Image (cartoon, rainbow, N blue to C red):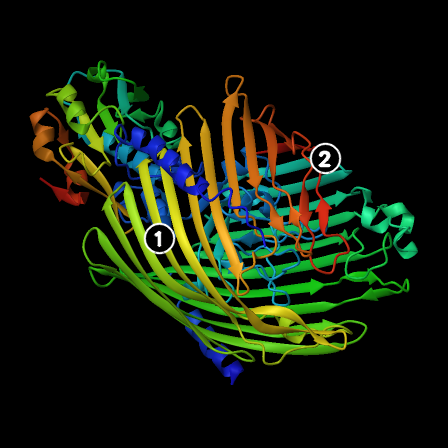
Amino acid sequence: MRATPKFRFLPVVLYWILNLFFSSTNALANPALADTQADKPSNNTNQNLTNIPLEELVDMDVTSASKVARQISDAPSAVSIVTADDIRAYGYRSIADIVNSMPGLYTPYDRSIYYLGGRGFGRSGDYVGRVLLMIDGYATNDNIYNEAYIGNDGLVDTELIERVEYVPGTGSSIYGNGAFLGIINIVTKKGSDFNGAQISAEVGSYGSRKGRVTFGKQLENGADVLLSASLLKSDGQDFFFPEFNNATADPNFAINHGVARNQDIERSPRLFAKIKFEGWTLEGGYVSRKHNNPTGAYNALFNKYTADWDTNGYVNLTHNDTISANLIATTRLYFGQYIDRTAITDQTATLLHEHNSGQWAGVDTKLVGDWFDNHKLIFGMEFRDDFKLHFKNAFNDAEFSRNTFSLYLQDEIYLSSQLRLNIGGRYDDSTNTDDHLSPRVALIYSPSEANTFKLSHSSAYRMPSAYEQFYRDPTQIPNANLKPEYVETIEFVMQHQFSDMTQLSSTLYHYETSDLIVNNAIGAGLNQNQNEGSGHTNGIEISMQKNWGDGLRIRGNYAYQRAIDSSNQHLMNSPENLAKLNITFPVMKHAFRTGLELQYTDDRVTESLHTAPSYTLTNLTLTTEHPIYHTNASLSIRNLFDTHYVAVAPAGYVQDTLQMDGINAWLQLTYDIQ
Amino acid sequence: MNKLFQLILLGLYASSLSRASAEPIPEYEMKSTYLYYFAVYADWDESIRPNLNICIIGKDLFGTTINSLENKEINGRRATIKHLTNLENVSTCQILYFSESDLYSPKHILSAVADLPILTITDNALANDFMINLKVDKNRLMFDINYEAMKKNRLTMSSKVLNLAHRVY
């Protein structure tokens, strides 16, 4: 529909500029090895290490700085990392805040739920997303909607996060279902990172407040314990929606003059626990977030009680075992649970309740072997039992289950010291949907320590969510024959690490999607999900990072994505250009740190095929660099210039776009007891 | 059938848990500990000075891990960590550590050391003429000792350390 290729040359020009900037520093730089960010020293054991004789130390495992960096560049895509330092410096309070700074990712908000968009896909209301969200290797997406929870419904407080890695591109060849457009892995902190108790009190705009208590310690026997609990509450805002104040067109739409009052109330308690002992890690998380939806969406009676209530919990037991010098095994045993207790006041003022719940458990064993000089083998199997998929509403009560058995194998072949071939795939056999093989082949060429080129070809898939397959209400009928969605990709990555302080990476990709699940009207007022959609996306992602020794850090990225469906239309809510810039530096003799964030989002097509205009947001955070009397403070101002901007509303909303928050603030004080 | 599968998998799982392994140590934490031991077991064969200066030239990848060596008593001498911004004062160092630098090449540094009794240590694979080369291999921190170079600068190392070296030449 849109024919304004105003940014056609922008990617090329930007790429040139970036290349020029970096090639000028190249001459001075050393082809370096390590990423100092990756080797954040832990403050716990050095004192003890000098008590261990050298002959024992030489046999102890080390986690190497260069290895962390290399592990990342081993992935045949350009991995982005946000560290705990960044989370603090930029005042990130949710996973959505964190991923918003990453190349090509965006998080549309529909005034109740955050969606995760990337690589062209970002339709509001699309619960499934297509990115797998993991915490310490555990896949968090629930088994009803396949949703990645990234707002206040997310499983961890950001203060507990050590780093977040975004691996763009397909990940099904190792991770299987749902790793369609990328993987986000959250790595949580250790107890010893806190080394005592921490109390946090927070207040923010719109009557928001939050309290958190965290305890973390490495015990005498070597066990590392982390326990945390938090509670967030918010009164929220009153909203004026002109769509509900249209008395001349329709008297029914003039409800409360279009004002939704006290319909933005939110409450979210969280629990998190992690115990590590001798290769074992037992971890669990819980969140139960209840939030009113003020928008009158999905045929709800406006300005009356309608709420989303999502509860997620999991327990994950991991064991790492070095079986021999050449074989490392990681086994995980996990259990997860999800409950959706949506309540909607319908047009007859009747309060309708949904109670959709899922439970799942599984075991995954992954082995990494390097018996042969020029091969690194990864193989494993996973069995997952989604033993409870329960839908209950006023019209229907039905329970389903699903089993998935998976095998995966990957071999990294060193063709020469500079050239590696990475070949692998995963086979998933699942009840009630087609089995699937997701292959991947990648060629990785590193002419020097500083330069890496990766070319990969892969396919990934996403099973229909239980909701897409089984949900029934007066307007929606199930489709037992629903098949998975597929994507086939070609990706080319160039990475340049000029020193441990400077890196640049750029990615070109092409995606072909098929059998996309589309909710079609099938007559008689009924809808059904069908495998009908297809399309293709071409994109460029460029990101750079430069750190200076005096504490100045700059990260920037730019993504161009052109997502077209089979009828040659732009995908809904898919901005063609996204640019982000993050700058942080110490001020006042390192007493405080400033974090400045700029985010540009291009215009997007709305559900009614209008255009939601582009916008640039500025966020500013001021934090204490060191505790003062054991107290740290952080003040964030979001949307500093009070920019007026809108998000695209999902289908099922009366509104076509929703106005987002103006300038707002958040203050956090943390007190450490050691 | 599924229950049987689960049992088999659980069995496999249980059987893989028999061995316990220790928590890995961050690389630079281990490196600073090695540095401590090299200081303990090296002999400078010079008049005893009150301070043992551990100098770092170029980029400091240790972060805070090196700080625990500050003021530590090593064979009756007080360890001091120095970050060198140039090579002029290199003669005050007993140990010189080099990872990487935009300004100084390994050759540059070694020519400044010349035949001074300074134990040169590096983890930069390109600096292979240093006395001790650290490298991580298969998750272990290993080291090579260029004992000829040590002897040339009138330094000795306890056989205990030499025996633990990956390679002595």
Which residue does the image show at 45% across and 30% down from the upper left? A553
Kind of residue at badge 1: Phe
Q: Answer yes or no: is residue A330 visible.
A: yes
Q: Is residue A185 above or below residue A54?
A: below
* Callout 1: SS: strand
Side of A97 where A164 appears, left or right: left
Q: For residue A299, what is the image quadrant? A: bottom right
- Give the residue at mark 1: A492
Q: Answer yes or no: is residue A51 visible.
A: no
User: Between A127 and A537, which is closer to the camera in this rendering?
Assistant: A537
Q: Quadrant of the C terminus of chain B?
A: top left
- Circle 2 packing at 10 Å, graded few (<14), some (14-19), many (20+), is some
Residue farthest to the front, as pictured? A3
Side of A178 where A371 appears, left or right: left
- Give the residue at mark 2: A203
- Circle 1 packing at 10 Å, graded few (<14), some (14-19), many (20+), is many
In percent of width and height, residue B161 lies at 19, 39
Which residue does the image show at 90% across and 62% down from the upper left? A349
Kind of residue at badge 2: Val
* Gap in angstroms between the C-alphas marked 1 and 2: 45 Å
Residue farthest to the top, as pictured? B88
Mark earlier in primary sequence (1, 2): 2
Q: Give the chain letter at badge 1.
A: A
Q: Give the chain letter at badge 2.
A: A
Please state which of the two labelled residues, at mark 1 or mark 2, is closer to the viewer: 1
User: Between A245 and A28, which is closer to the camera in this rendering?
Assistant: A245
In percent of width and height, residue A110 lies at 70, 51
In percent of width and height, residue A202 lies at 69, 36
In percent of width and height, residue B31 lies at 30, 37
Residue farthest to the bottom, as pictured? B1
